[in-house]
């Protein structure tokens, strides 16, 4: 009888001790520290501020479009619709675009050519990274090797070859055209690409990336594929 009571008492004490240990560890568990240095935090803050600025610019642009449409609709509804449709086609990449921009030339590195190394072409990951860098610095309209980039563009590997809009890229050399909203934005993008680490990534893949100086007028061709509208639905207004 005493042995049974002692066993139960021991079990109860074990459970109480285990719960106390768990509670102690929970209370005293240290918070995870942010191991980023000041420069990395500043870069993250700069990216967030830039994204915030872009969103504000887009909101202002949409509000301006609504104001113009409202004013024009009172005078000439048909003309307002035509102008709005043209602006939307241009924003979607379905029409030829002209504006201030820069051109990036992707070529085999001189060392690779001198050593007779085989140039396999640019990888999808590297091309996506470059496109993301362009988008971060106000690159509004982009064309890669004559292939217009739109919202539904896919950059992927198909049968061992990098494709854009399901069309294979030429083996370097080829060019990438980028149009920005203003000449100032093009200059900022130009300076950013010249100082970017992505230049080293290209060199590792036996490629070089040469950035032309900003131009006042650069022409980018229209998207020449079919836009998938299967999931779009028309709504009737009152």
Image (cartoon, rainbow, N blue to C red):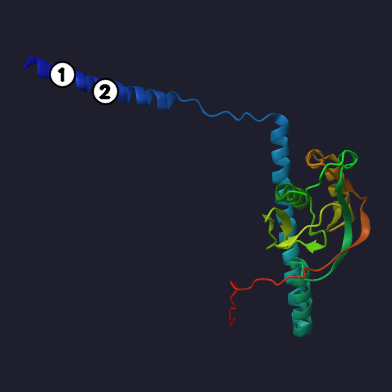
Q: Which residue is mark 1?
A: 7
In the displayed structure image, the side of residue 86 where residue 4 appears, left or right: left
Q: Disc 2 or disc 1, which is closer to the eye?
A: 1
Q: Position of residue 193 (x, y in %)?
A: 83, 45
Question: Badge 1, how many Cα within 10 Å: few under 14, some, many 20+?
Answer: few
Label 2 residue SS: helix
Up/down of 106 relative to 216, above or below: above
Please name whichever residue, 237 or 149, is drawn nearer the observer in this view of the structure.
149
Q: Give how far apart the Cα atoms at labels 2 and 1 are.
A: 14 Å
Q: Which residue is mark 2?
A: 16
Seen as rendered, the residue at the extreme front is: 116
Residue at the (76%, 72%) spot, across then down: 89
Please name whichever residue, 49 or 234, is drawn nearer the observer in this view of the structure.
234
Query: What mark, if any, has residue 108 been given in the picture?
Result: none
Residue at the (70%, 48%) spot, across then down: 125
Labels 2 and 1 touching (C-beta < 8 A):
no
Q: Position of residue 63 (x, y in %)?
A: 72, 66
Please name whichever residue, 203 or 198, is drawn nearer the observer in this view of the structure.
203
Q: What is the quadrant of residue 195 in the picture?
A: top right
Q: Position of residue 189 (x, y in %)?
A: 84, 49
Question: Badge 2, how many Cα within 10 Å: few under 14, some, many 20+?
Answer: few
Q: Quadrant of the N terminus?
A: top left
Please name whichever residue, 206 or 76, is drawn nearer the observer in this view of the structure.
206
Label 1 residue SS: helix
Q: What is the quadrant of residue 83 in the picture?
A: bottom right
Q: Position of residue 33 (x, y in %)?
A: 57, 28
Lower position in the chain sequence, tag 2 or tag 1:
1
Residue at the (58%, 78%) spot, across then down: 235
Q: Quadrant of the C terminus?
A: bottom right
Up/down of 168 relative to 15, above or below: below
Residue at the (58%, 71%) spot, across then down: 231
């Amino acid at each position: 009888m005493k042995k049974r009571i002692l066993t139960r008492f021991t079990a109860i004490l074990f459970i109480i001790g285990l719960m106390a240990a768990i509670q102690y560890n929970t209370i005293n568990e240290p918070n995870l520290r942010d191991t980023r240095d000041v420069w990395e935090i500043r870069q993250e803050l700069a990216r967030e501020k830039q994204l915030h600025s872009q969103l504000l610019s887009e909101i202002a642009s949409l509000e301006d479009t609504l104001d113009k449409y409202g004013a024009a609709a009172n005078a000439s509804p048909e003309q307002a619709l035509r102008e709005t449709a043209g602006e939307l086609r241009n924003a979607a990449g379905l029409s030829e675009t002209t504006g201030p921009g820069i051109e990036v030339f992707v070529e085999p590195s001189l060392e690779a050519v001198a050593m007779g190394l085989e140039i396999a072409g640019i990888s999808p990951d590297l091309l996506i990274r470059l496109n993301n860098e362009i988008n971060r610095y106000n690159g509004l309209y982009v064309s890669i090797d004559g292939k217009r980039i739109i919202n539904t563009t896919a950059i992927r590997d198909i049968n061992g070859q990098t494709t854009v809009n399901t069309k294979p890229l030429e083996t370097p050399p080829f060019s990438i055209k980028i149009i920005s909203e203003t000449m100032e934005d093009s200059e900022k993008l130009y300076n950013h690409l010249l100082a970017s680490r992505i230049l080293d990534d290209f060199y590792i893949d036996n490629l070089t990336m040469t950035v032309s100086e900003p131009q006042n007028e650069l022409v980018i061709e229209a998207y020449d594929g079919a836009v998938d509208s299967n999931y779009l639905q028309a709504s009737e207004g009152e």
